[in-house]
Amino acid sequence: MKHLRAISVPLFAAALLCGCGPSFDPEYSDRIGNEAPEMDGYRPEEEPGWAPDESEIPGYVPEPAGWSCYYDETYNYDWHDDVLCVNGAQSHRPYLLEGYDFVAYEDIMAAAADYELYLNSH
């Protein structure tokens, strides 16, 4: 009997720790008074003042907001082209700070911000 107790206590503790215990049973939950709310076909668009987000409208294509440049490492051992500029479906990878031997992240992002302003001004 001691062997059975020595095995069952650790097994019970392991079951509690791993979450292997009983799972949620809505039928049991109803019997103890924790009833789930009834949704009965509830849809948020039936609320007054609700309007669909533009992205939810079929066929909606957002207008490009202009050029946006961000850091996008190329892993080609050339720091000058680690920026990608996008404008909707268009993209462009500029070659920035060409005269520099080494380009730090802060330098390339400052040049990218200047280049983004240049692209959006034309």
Image (cartoon, rainbow, N blue to C red):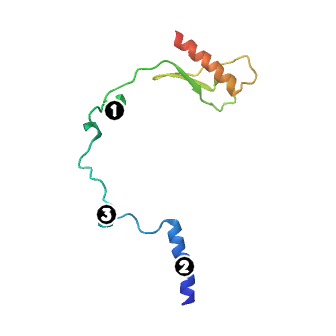
Relative image position of residue 100 (x, y in whole percent) = 74, 19
Residue on which the image places disc 1: 56
Q: Earlier in the sequence, mark 2 or mark 1?
A: 2
Q: Check if mark 3's residue and mark 1's residue have beta carbons within 8 Å.
A: no
Residue 33 is tagged as 3
Q: Distance from label 3 to label 1 (Cα)?
A: 38 Å
Sort mark 3 into few (<14), some (14-19) or many (20+) by Cα contacts within 10 Å: few
Mark found first going from the N terminus, 3 or 1? 3
Please state, as top left, top right, bottom left or bottom right, where the N terminus lies in the image.
Answer: bottom right
Q: Is residue 27 above or below residue 44?
A: below
Which residue is at 57% across, 14% downward?
117
Q: Quadrant of residue 76?
A: top right
Q: CA distance from mark 2 to mark 1?
A: 54 Å
Of residues 104 and 79, which is closer to you in this image?
A: 104
The quadrant in which residue 56 appears is top left
Of tags 3 and 1, the one toward the viewer is 3
Give the residue type at disc 1: Glu
Question: What whole-number distance in Å separates the C-alpha atoms at marks 3 and 2?
Answer: 32 Å
Residue type of the residue flagged with mark 2: Val
For label 1, the SS is helix
Residue shown at 31%/31% (left/top)?
Answer: 52
| Residue type highlighted by circle 3 | Gly
Residue that mark 2 sits on: 9
Q: Does residue 33 appear to the left or right of 7 in the view shown?
A: left
Name the residue: 70% across, 30% down: 77
Instruction: Tell me if mark 2 has few (under 14), some (14-19) or many (20+) residues whose alpha carbon lies within 10 angstroms of its own.
Output: few
Residue 80, visible in the rendered structure: no
